[in-house]
Structure formats: C-alpha cells, structure tokens
Image (spheres, grey):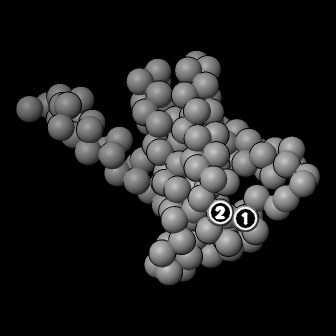
C-alpha cells in the first residue's frame, strides 16, 4: 500500500478524526470549566442532575459541530479550525444566555440543581450546535 493509500484509508481517516475530536472535546470541556462558576465534574460526582444536563448538552453541542466540520472540510486543519470556531460560538451563546436572563444567575441555578435551567441550557447547546454546524462552510 502506498503512503497516500494508507493515509486515505477509511479506517485511518476515521481514527484520525476521532482522535482529534476527542482531544478538542477535552480542551473544550476544560474551557467550559473555566467559564462556569461551578466545578462541573465535582457537581456531577455529587449527583447534580442540572449540571449533568448542561454538561451533556455542551458535549453533544461540541461533538455535533465537529461532525458538521468533518463533513464539510477536506483537510484536518480546516476541520479543526471550523470546529473550534463553532465551539467559540457555543461559548458566546452560553454567555449570552447568562446575560439575557437578568432575573436569575444561570450558573447559580444550575449549581443549585435547578433542573429546568439545566434542561434549557442543554437545549440551547444542542439546538445552536445544529445552527452553527449547518452554517459552517
């Protein structure tokens, strides 16, 4: 098998995309940990369902954006760049969500296990990931 043939084999490409997206997901979860005022994984360990829903929505959102990025781009650097751009938009959406709800603090409500706020956060992350993903060109 030629070098070009090896790198273009579907199993190799899939493994490469999978590895890069998992790494980007880990980085994005660390960044979300810095953006939120609570400790995501500590709260999940304690059984905080609202945090689990919000975090699950972010995980789905980030991976869905990368799904669209893989689909639309031929090179790994393009896929990573557009995926990270989509992730930044998702972070901006989270900050806007906090800003547009002045009657209560989103982070405090989620940390207090307010499941309705956690569910809305999940829905915003998932819904916007489809919009962001569809707009990636």
- The residue that mark 1 highlights is 109
Quadrant for the C terminus, please. Answer: top right
Give the crowd class for mark 1: few <14, some 14-19, many >=20 residues within 10 Å: some
Task: Tell me: 70 left or right of 65.
Answer: left
**Residue 94 appears at what percent x and percent y?**
72, 48
Pick whichever of labels 1 and 2 is earlier in the sequence.
1
Instruction: Using residue 38 as the reference point, say whether residue 40 is left or right of it.
Output: left
Q: Name the residue that disc number 2 marks.
A: 114
Can residue 30 be seen here? no
Asked if labels 2 and 1 touch by Cβ distance under 8 angstroms, the answer is yes
Residue 113 vertical placement versus 18 (above, below) = below
Q: Position of residue 69 (x, y in %)?
A: 49, 30
Q: CA separation, marks 1 and 2?
A: 5 Å
Please indicate whether residue 87 sits to the left or right of residue 98 in the image: left
How many numbered tags mark residues here?
2
The 10 Å Cα crowd at callout 2, few under 14, some 14 to 19, many 20 or more, is some
The secondary element bearing badge 1 is classed as: helix
Q: Is residue 126 above or below residue 31?
A: above
For residue 105, which quarter of the picture? bottom right
Location of the N terminus by quadrant is: top left
Q: Position of residue 127 (x, y in %)?
A: 58, 33
Q: Secondary structure at mark 2?
A: loop
Tell which of 81 and 59 is nearer to you.
59
Vertical relation: 70 (above or below) 134: below
Name which residue lies at 85% across and 59% down: 104
Query: Can you give x and y, in whole percent of width and height, for residue 19 in the image?
Result: 34, 51
Visible residue check, residue 40: yes
């Amino acid at each position: 098998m030629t070098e070009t043939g090896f790198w273009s084999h579907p199993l190799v490409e899939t493994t490469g995309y999978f590895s890069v997206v998992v790494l980007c997901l880990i980085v994005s979860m660390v960044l979300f940990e810095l953006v939120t005022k609570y400790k995501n994984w500590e709260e999940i360990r304690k059984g905080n369902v609202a945090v689990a829903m919000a975090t699950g929505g972010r995980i789905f959102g980030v991976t869905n954006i990368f799904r669209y990025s893989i689909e639309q781009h031929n090179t790994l650097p393009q896929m990573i760049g557009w995926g990270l751009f989509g992730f930044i938009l998702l972070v901006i959406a989270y900050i806007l969500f906090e800003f547009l709800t002045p009657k209560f603090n989103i982070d405090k409500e989620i940390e207090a296990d307010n499941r309705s706020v956690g569910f809305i956060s999940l829905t915003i992350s998932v819904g916007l990931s489809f919009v962001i993903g569809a707009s990636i060109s």
